[in-house]
Image (cartoon, rainbow, N blue to C red):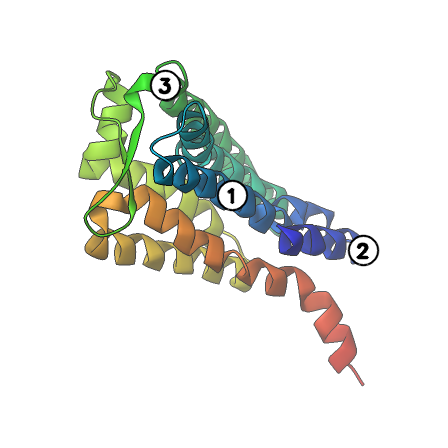
Amino acid sequence: MPLGLYATHIAKRTDQKDYVPLALTPFFFGVQQFSEGLVWTGIDNGKVEPLTTLASLAFLFFAYCFWMIWIPWSAWSIARSTESKALLHRLKWVAIVATVLGIGFYLPVLFNPPAVQPSVHSTGRLLYDISNLHSAWHNFVNTEPVGELVYWGFIVLPLVALRDKAVKLFGILIFVSIFLTWFTYSKTFNSVWCFYCAVLSIFVIWIINRPRLSSRQAP
């Protein structure tokens, strides 16, 4: 969380206002990881309620909704100063569609908290069992390979589409983390992947700090 605030400060100080949403990404990952820490606290104490459910809803808000919205809009914001109007227009529509889908993805969870049943999987990772959630769209995205690819595409492709090579690399690293998690901890994908991405978000500090590093290296 402090790294996200630091990156935001640097983005504003170095006149990179279009990068501010991306700079805030580590901060929000910190909030998400904090919420999952509260889930662990609730479970370790015998599923203390309402702590366990509320913390799970907070974590799943980021996993199911926030990132699907935030990342496309962050890419669109960067594109305002780096990309053609045509790509900017496409990214705007991608962000709009992602916003609608992300909200639609999370609302069934929000309005049916009893369906959220976090538990510790045999691998020692957190499993968010929402198999009792009756939502065709949510079940499609959460269980079907095509649905998962749609979700991942809205997060990875907007970053990869940008001209900025560092941001593009960040998108590629997220793509790698997806398949690394899927092949190793598919049952507890949500928890493990979000942790990996939280670690990867530290890379954003370097993306934002490049102007300062370049000025220091200049003769």
Name the spot of residue 30 as percent of width and height, x first. 55, 47
Mark 2: few/some/many CA within 10 Å (<14, 14-19, 20+): few
Amino acid at dot 1: Phe
User: In the visual, does 76 lie left or right of 183?
Assistant: right
Residue 80, visible in the rendered structure: no
Q: CA distance from mark 2 to mark 3?
A: 42 Å
Mark 1: few/some/many CA within 10 Å (<14, 14-19, 20+): some
Amino acid at dot 3: Pro
Against 194, residue 214 (above or below) is: below
User: In the visual, does 29 lie left or right of 120?
Assistant: right
Residues tagged 2 and 3 counted as in contact (Cβ below 8 A): no
Point 60% across, 47% down: residue: 27
Task: Work out whether mark 2 precedes mark 3 in sequence or the reverse, and give the earlier one.
Answer: 2
Q: Which residue is mark 1?
A: 34
Point 36% across, 21% down: residue: 109
Q: Residue furthest bottom?
A: 219
Rendering quarter of residue 117 = top left
Mark 3: few/some/many CA within 10 Å (<14, 14-19, 20+): some
Q: Which residue is mark 3?
A: 113
Name the spot of residue 99 as percent of width and height, x first. 48, 27
Point 68% across, 64% down: residue: 209
Name the spot of residue 69 as percent of width and height, x first. 49, 33
Amino acid at dot 2: Arg
Point 48% across, 45% down: residue: 33
Task: Work out whether mark 2 precedes mark 1 in sequence or the reverse, and give the earlier one.
Answer: 2
Quick one: SS at disc 3? helix
Quick one: SS at disc 2? helix
> Which of pointers 2 and 1 indicates the residue nearer the eye?
1
Q: Which residue is mark 2?
A: 13
